[in-house]
């Protein structure tokens, strides 16, 4: 079972890997990035508003000092489906809202093609502050930030999480497998060792789809979300992702 000591040990190991592969120093000023957001064990005392408030003042990693606005995520607090992306981009950082740029528009198209509206679902990222120049989130940042996501998921209790891209899929499933291998296969996500599984569908990130806008890739994402609709017993519209 992951306790605070284990989490801190893993964070330290990830930070060392960070330092090795990305030249990111876990020492000195950046040592603060090894701090872990304290998990909120008493759900009765927790709320999405409380989590948002903590994120707004969070400086657990260096991204807190670089952001314009934190992006906690938004949507239906009782959503059946939660979409989890990687990290805010420039538009999200400007507005403090998840998925509002070009990739956000494509995500809206996907949600609409599913016969749903953005207000029906919850949309967020594993990282709540924008990494500079849209670089990949570093392992230490993911470790520091994901307790917020776990708390959000514990409160929302969705029936299905749709993980958009490699980082959320790998982080939530604790695997190193490529998104090409993971996508399209419904899996189980556990908030902790004692929690019931939540179904998780990995699929491509809308930004990847935009960069690789082929009929085949659109079909793959459409097939993935159809499986989610089927699992939820929701009607599958004829409309496809354009
Ligand atoms: S990215 Fe997450 S952990 Fe880092 S400062 Fe922002 S909210 Fe805190």
Image: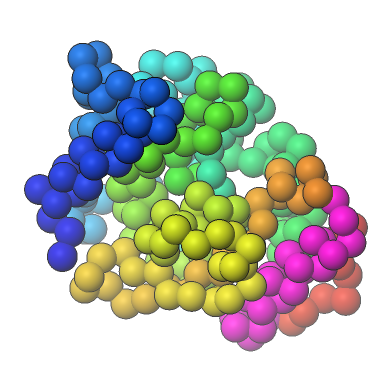
Residue 140, given in percent of the width and then of the height, sits at 33, 36
Outermost residue on the front side: it is 20
- Measuring 22% from the left and 70% from the top, which residue is drawn there? 193
Residue 194, given in percent of the width and then of the height, sits at 21, 73
Outermost residue on the left side: it is 5
Image position of 30 (left or right of 117) = left
The residue segment tinted magenta is 213-234
Indicate whether 236 appears above or below 67. Answer: below
Q: Quadrant of residue 229?
A: bottom right
Residue 34, given in percent of the width and then of the height, sits at 23, 32
Indicate whether 33 appears above or below 211. Answer: above
- Measuring 39% from the left and 16% from the top, which residue is drawn there? 65
Which of 133/101 is in front?
Answer: 133
- Measuring 72% from the left and 34% from the top, which residue is drawn there? 101
Image position of 104 (left or right of 87) = right
Where does the N terminus fall, quadrant-wise?
bottom left
Q: Reply yes or no: does residue 223 show up in magenta.
A: yes
Asked whether residue 103 appears in the rendered view, the answer is yes
Q: Reply yes or no: does residue 233 show up in magenta.
A: yes
Q: Main secondary structure of the magenta part?
A: helix
Asked whether residue 115 appears in the rendered view, the answer is no
Indicate whether 7 appears above or below 185. Answer: above
Q: Quadrant of residue 164?
A: bottom right
Where does the C terminus fall, quadrant-wise?
bottom right
């Amino acid at each position: 079972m992951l306790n605070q000591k284990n989490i801190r040990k893993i964070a330290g190991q990830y930070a060392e890997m960070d330092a090795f592969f990305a030249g990111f120093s876990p020492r000195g000023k950046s040592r603060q990035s090894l701090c872990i957001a304290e998990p909120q064990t008493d759900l009765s005392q927790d709320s999405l508003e409380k989590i948002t408030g903590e994120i707004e003042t969070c400086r657990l990693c260096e991204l807190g000092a670089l952001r314009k606005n934190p992006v906690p995520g938004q949507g239906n607090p009782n959503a059946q489906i939660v979409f989890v992306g990687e990290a805010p981009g420039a538009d999200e950082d400007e507005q403090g809202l998840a998925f509002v740029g070009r990739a956000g528009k494509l995500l809206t198209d996907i949600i609409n093609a599913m016969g749903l509206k953005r207000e029906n679902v919850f949309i967020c990222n594993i990282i709540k502050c924008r990494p500079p120049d849209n670089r990949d989130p570093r392992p230490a940042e993911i470790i520091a930030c994901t307790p917020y996501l776990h708390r959000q998921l514990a409160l929302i209790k969705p029936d299905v999480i749709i993980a958009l891209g490699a980082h959320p899929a790998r982080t939530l499933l604790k695997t190193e497998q490529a998104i090409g291998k993971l996508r399209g296969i419904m899996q189980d996500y556990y908030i902790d060792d004692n929690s019931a599984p939540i179904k998780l569908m990995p699929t491509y990130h809308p930004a990847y789809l935009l960069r690789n806008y082929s009929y085949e890739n659109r079909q793959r994402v459409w097939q993935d979300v159809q499986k989610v609709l089927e699992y939820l017993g929701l009607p599958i519209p004829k409309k496809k992702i354009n």
